[in-house]
Amino acid sequence: MSKTIAAIASGNAPGGIGVIRISGDRAIEIASSVFSPADGSSLTELKGYRAKFGNIILDGSKADNAVALVFRAPKSYTGEDVAELSIHGGMLALKNTLEAVFAAGAQSAEAGEFTKRAFLNGKIDLTQAESVAQIISAQGEAELKASFNALHGVLSDEINLVLEKLLDMSALMAAWVDYPDEEIPELTETELEENLEFSAAKLKKLLDNYESGQTITCGVETVIAGRPNAGKSSLMNMLSKTEKSIVTHIEGTTRDIVEDSVRLGDIVLHLKDTAGLRNSEDLVESIGIEKALGAIENAQLVLAVFDLSQRLSEDDFKLIEKCKGKNAIGVINKTDLEAKMDVSVIENAFESVVYISAKNNEGLEELSKAVYNLLGVADFDSNAPLLANLRQKQNCQKAYESICEALNGVKTGVTFDAINVMIDSAADELLSLTGKKATSEVVNNIFSKFCVGK
Ligand code: GDP
């Protein structure tokens, strides 16, 4: 008998409605000890997928109105009996009811324990469990869509397709080696090669998409750089549509790095608006400039801002130099003013150049397109299966390498039992990826990153 666990599932902030989730063999009995249906019936008699309106009863008196939802094992999120109590979403109301649920015999759920139970009860695999955490933390539309697809098995299906091929090949080859006299259908070298090539191609595609997937799902560390007054803060404001950066006429006002995350269509840019790039006598400002140069060094994307209404200065040339070899876009700002700058210098120095007027909010769409193209995510398909994290990528990479090794072995006439070892090793990696063979350390590590109540 597994212990029955409970937690607030609706997060740690007040809301219109708050939900207490209880899961385990005693879930419904425990829920019925704090909840009384208004129609006088008993929650313990209620069938699965049914709801009852009623009251939370604490110390013998009505404490809140509530709706109780009942799910019967195995048809629930965790695969166990589950009761969910939806009450008014004040933190005190939730805490009082949760304490009563604990007093009735439930234990406090650990981080991710509901989803971990769903995994252990075979309701979802590890990639799907990881996608739950990703749905909760998603900031961009594409990330949300990709994680939702993963929850619905788009990645698992792809992995299982390859896995099935590998296991079929492995079973046939093992039978063939072990029982040479039996009439086992022969696996020809051509078939073997075809199957291995098919598997390698599927995994290669997943690996190729990994970087764009990460760009989409993790966001892009972006630095806005340029000499003072070029319009960095204004660009930041245009992007974030907030007044977070100070826009002013006094040079060098943006002394430290201002950070903000903004959504640019499907992707999230983690923006750093740096101090103006110039030599400064001012100590505080020079610290900011040092940080700016360091930030460019580590950025995944640099938006190098130039002022169209001014001639190019020494600082502008320094910035151009600094951006060499980086993922940088030349952003020529102040298109509403008379042009004094020689734009051909910027056009020649940057692979991608965009004209904007940050003041008039013009050029956002062009900038967005340039960012997508430069980061190689313009054609990103959020419906395609996607490896969500380094753990998944590493399993996939190792499986791919073993398959390539096996393929090479077939071509160079290596014995079938040696090839079978390589195929088994690839299959093992994929079984770890989906969690069918993952170590408890890997599993615990994944769920420890969840929030309580999920
Ligand atoms: P930063 O020092 O690079 O952060 O520059 P700011 O964003 O603080 O802008 C400096 C000055 O240029 C401010 O007075 C802004 O209003 C002005 N400015 C910024 N963008 C534009 C623009 O597109 N057109 C015009 N005319 N002025 C701009």
Image (cartoon, grey):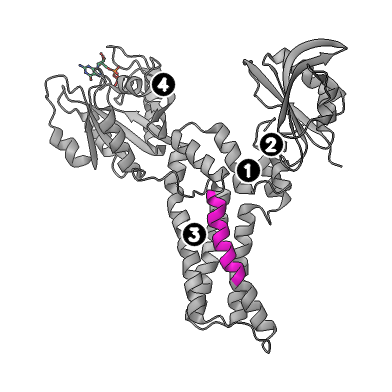
Q: What residue sits 67% from the left and 43% below the top? A: 445
Ligand 1 placement by image quarter: top left
Q: Which of 350 and 192 is in front in this view?
A: 192
Locate residue 252 relative to residue 214 in the image: left or right: left
Q: Earlier in the sequence, mark 1 or mark 4?
A: 1
Q: Residue 40 carries which label?
A: none
Task: Write down the residue under mark 3.
Answer: 203
Which element is circle 1 on?
helix
Amino acid type of disc 4? Asp
- Let me know if residue 21 appears in the view: no
Task: Write down the residue under mark 1.
Answer: 129
Amino acid type of disc 3? Leu
Task: Write down the residue under mark 4.
Answer: 256
Which element is circle 2 on?
loop
Q: Earlier in the sequence, mark 1 or mark 2?
A: 2
Q: Which part of the image, by quadrant, shows the N terminus?
A: top right
